[in-house]
Amino acid sequence: TFSCRLEPPPAAIGTGLACYIMTLGVLPRCRRRGIGRAMWREIRKIYEDRVDWYVLHVQVDNLRALGFYRRAGFREYDV
């Protein structure tokens, strides 16, 4: 499941409009099957013509999520 909202991006990353990804989750028993990547592609398809940025928060100790988002092209801008 995923949930997003549109909002201004944090000042540290720029101006324009951001898609804030509030949740993007896959049940543990369903992970490692490409479902998260498919949801990320769908989010981009929905918002690509409307936003300048994609923003989210991840716990620094959630190494799996950090790896997923890094592979998807996200960069850390604040810790």
Image (cartoon, rainbow, N blue to C red):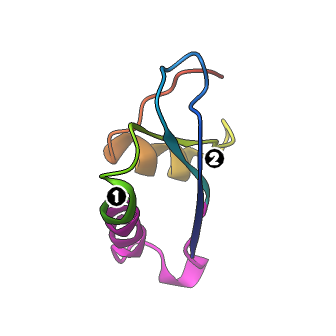
Q: In percent of the image, x 49 and y 38: which residue is there?
A: 17
Residue 8 locus on image (x, y percent): 59, 34
Q: Nearer the viewer, residue 45 or 37?
A: 45
Q: In percent of the image, x 61 and y 26: which residue is there?
A: 10
Q: Is residue 1 left or right of residue 71?
A: right
Mark 1 element type = helix
Residue 50 locus on image (x, y percent): 38, 50
**Residue neighbourhood size for the residue with mark 1, other residues' Cα within 10 Å, grouped as few (<14), some (14–19), many (≥20):** some
In the image as oriented, which residue stretches furthest toward the top? 12
Mark linked to residue 62: 2
Residue 11 locus on image (x, y percent): 60, 18
Residue 72 locus on image (x, y percent): 33, 48
> Mark 1 belongs to which amino acid?
Arg
Closer mark to the observer between disc 1 and disc 2 = 1
Above or below, 35 against 55 in this view is below
Q: In percent of the image, x 46 and y 30: which residue is there?
A: 16
The stretch in magenta equals: 23-43
Residue 60 sits in quarter:
top right
Mark linked to residue 2: none
Q: Which residue is mark 1?
A: 44
Cα separation between marks 1 and 2 = 23 Å
Q: Nearer the viewer, residue 78 or 43?
A: 43
> Mark 2 belongs to which amino acid?
Asn
Q: Nearer the viewer, residue 33 or 48?
A: 48
Q: Is residue 44 left or right of residue 77?
A: left
Q: Is residue 48 visible?
A: yes
